Amino acid sequence: MNHKYLDNMKNYSCLILCFLSIQMIFATDYYCDPVNGKESNIGTKTSPWKTLASVFEKGAKLNDGDVVFLLSGNHGDVKITGVNEKYINIKAVEGETPIVNSIVFGTEEIPASRWVISNVNFKGSASSIVFIHENSTRIRLIENQFISVNSMNTAITIKGTQCKIESNVISNFKNGIKISGNKNQIRNNRIAFFNNNAIEVSGEYNLLEYNLIKESVVTDSDINNGIYLNDLNIKGTIFRGNTIINFITFNRDNIGLCNGIYGKNLNVSESVFENNVIVSNGENGISVQGELSNLKIVNNTVVNPYFGLDFEGNTIINSPLKIKVLGLDNSSNIIIGNNLCNDVLFENIKGVADHNLTIPVSVHDFDMCFKNWALFDFSLGSDSKALNMGASDMAPTLDVSLNKRALGNFVNIGAFEYTKINEGNEVFKITSQISDRQIHSKGKGDWDGQAEIRIGGVGEDLDGAGVFPFKIPSIPVGKKILKANFKVYLTKIDNQPQGGIDLYGLPPKANYWVTEDMYYQGTYGQDVSARPIQNNFIDSDMYSGVPKMSSSGQTELGNYLNTVVEAGSKSGDFVFLRMNPNSKNVTDFSRWNFVSANNDQKDKQPELELTVGYPELNQGNVNKKEAIKNTIVTASSPINNGDVAFYFFGIDPNENVDLKLLNSKGEQVFTQTLKLSNLSDNVYRTDNLDLSTGKYFLEYLIGTETKKQILFVW
């Protein structure tokens, strides 16, 4: 064997490796200038090439890690091939607005791999402005603008694999993004004014998350789709945190029906639909039909807020927006939970459907449920029935705006976690209404406004009882009345009346008037129209002052009040407590005297004291999480592009909060100092901030505590 030859080959191989390493370390910056550049130039900043299209047409050599900077002007129709070990970046020079008509990655024979296009304006009439061939992989489109010339084409078609489409703005296309390849990521894109499908997807293991889809334009199709699942196999795909709003601009043409996430005749397996917000009319919010298996549909908000709006030829616009899961015979292992929607419909499936909350399509119900739905803010209002009512074992770890679940010990139903209830126990002290009244055995009552109420033998051949109305407070959803205590002040006892006084709860009413038919006296528990609470609540041996309820009486009072609330009585309705003698005939003028709500001694007026809280947090061995403190939650505005909302939790209202927002380059783009006492509902919304799409970092200072978090802006 020729050892000298082998030594030469080793040396040659080392030289090649060293040369390649040098190329990797010293990547080159190139420039394209359609206005002042020439194809014959060498591509430097002072000698730029002409257009991006011409660079690839003449076969210019680009190496791993190179960057091609584009200046303003039209760079033509670009065809890119070549497989790179390290990404080659093609991007706009800061402050320049380069235009590309179209890009095709790969051909039928030659693939393309590891190319990044960013901050470029795509504007053309090709059937697909960007087309990624099936043999191409790892193509990235980041923070580009797509504007259609004729509104009849597709912005991006992805047949390749492992591509990333992130923070792009796509406007006025027939179709926004079409995906049929595998393992692609479609994240944080804004797609508006589409007239067919904003996103169309098939394939396996794709990720569609945190995209904003809005302003459907109905032209040549009867119904558009936010995200359309075509009739091919879909496996292992995640639909997460997408917001789909049919329309925000009410006074424009071509408004019609729009499905949210929709597909029929499907074969879908091992896929997740979570934290999506679907705001549309019609019936199909999230609708999947076909052979379904191993699906998880959880914590979505799916509602129709377009009350009373009529569109020609459409009769279903005001119907409940549904989550529909319609399976074939083999459909199994389906989880449908923690969803907030107008309706849920499922057929021919095996699995679990639990903790879903449906709300009617009505102004009142939306007002009660959402913080500000008229501004398309579908985060939960402070009295929403969805607060803290979700099942934590079903819930994702983050919500629609990348905020942590759970904040506290519970999770919300729906896509939004950033409205929370104080999880501690709360005490309500409720004074009796001034309509409290003494009523008599002969079917009449004393006049209203008396300073004292007498019970027992109140007059000649006349016995009396007292009824006290109390207004039901606003009890946070999920909380129960843990303890209840009725306090009434006994001023004196006249002539040692027989027997004692029993305490009852009466049926609730929407008004506070005490009527004569509420009267009863006699054996405890025999009045079938009232709920017994405590026998001998007061007897003739008591001294003046406030009688103490027994522990069993307090329990019964709490049970009565919880039953009233659970049966449908709401905040502002009235409950009535009656004190009546348990002797059937009390000696005349032998009576108990009590301070009424009309008495000037306000500290002695009748009072109902309630302690409300979560029963599960008041058991002996519960491992409670700490209360929410010094927390800010952020969300990108779905209606005002580039604006942000800040939600504040557990912060002292008089504490200054310093906010600072940085872009991905670390540049400060927003700063503000706030005091919560000056805010409405603990929310601050920016106005005309006009941030570009992309990833941002929030830094905030409260006192001496600094925190950071990520925010995606549409």
Image (spheres, rainbow, N blue to C red):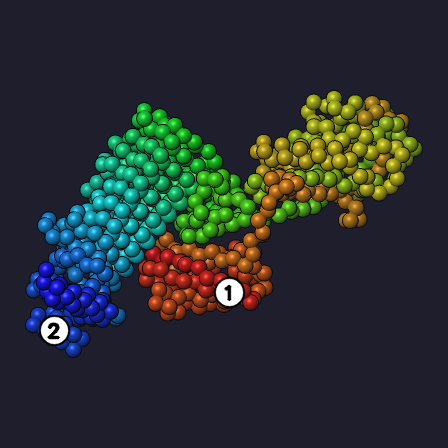
Query: In the image, which disc is placed on residue 42?
Result: 2
Task: Name which quarter of the figure residue 454 lies in.
Answer: top right
Q: Residue at x 69, y 39 (%)?
A: 483
Task: Name which quarter of the figure residue 96 lies in.
Answer: bottom left
User: Is 73 situated above or below 173?
Assistant: below
Residue 235, can we see it? Answer: yes
What SS does tag 2 mark? loop
Foreground: 449 or 305? 305
Q: Three-letter amino acid code at disc 2? A: Ile
Query: In the image, which disc is placed on residue 582?
Result: none
Tell how many labels.
Answer: 2
User: Is 269 situated above or below 158?
Assistant: above
- Asked whether the beta carbons under mark 1 and mark 2 sit within 8 Å of each other, the answer is no
Q: Three-letter amino acid code at disc 1? A: Thr
Residue bearing mark 1? 706
Residue 536 percent coordinates (x, y)? 81, 30
Foreground: 686 or 333? 333
Residue found at the very far front of the displayed protein: 1
Crowding near the residue tagged with mark 2, few <14, some 14–19, many ≥20 C-alpha atoms within 10 Å: some
Residue 625 percent coordinates (x, y)? 57, 49
User: Is 114 situated above or below 324?
Assistant: below
Q: Is residue 363 left or right of residue 82?
A: right
Residue 186 percent coordinates (x, y)? 29, 50
Q: Residue at x 89, y 34 (%)?
A: 541
Q: Residue at x 22, y 67 (%)?
A: 21
Foreground: 237 or 174? 237
Q: Quadrant of the C terminus?
A: bottom left
What SS does tag 1 mark? strand
Residue found at the very far right of the displayed protein: 495
Crowding near the residue tagged with mark 1, few <14, some 14–19, many ≥20 C-alpha atoms within 10 Å: few
Residue 667 percent coordinates (x, y)? 37, 69
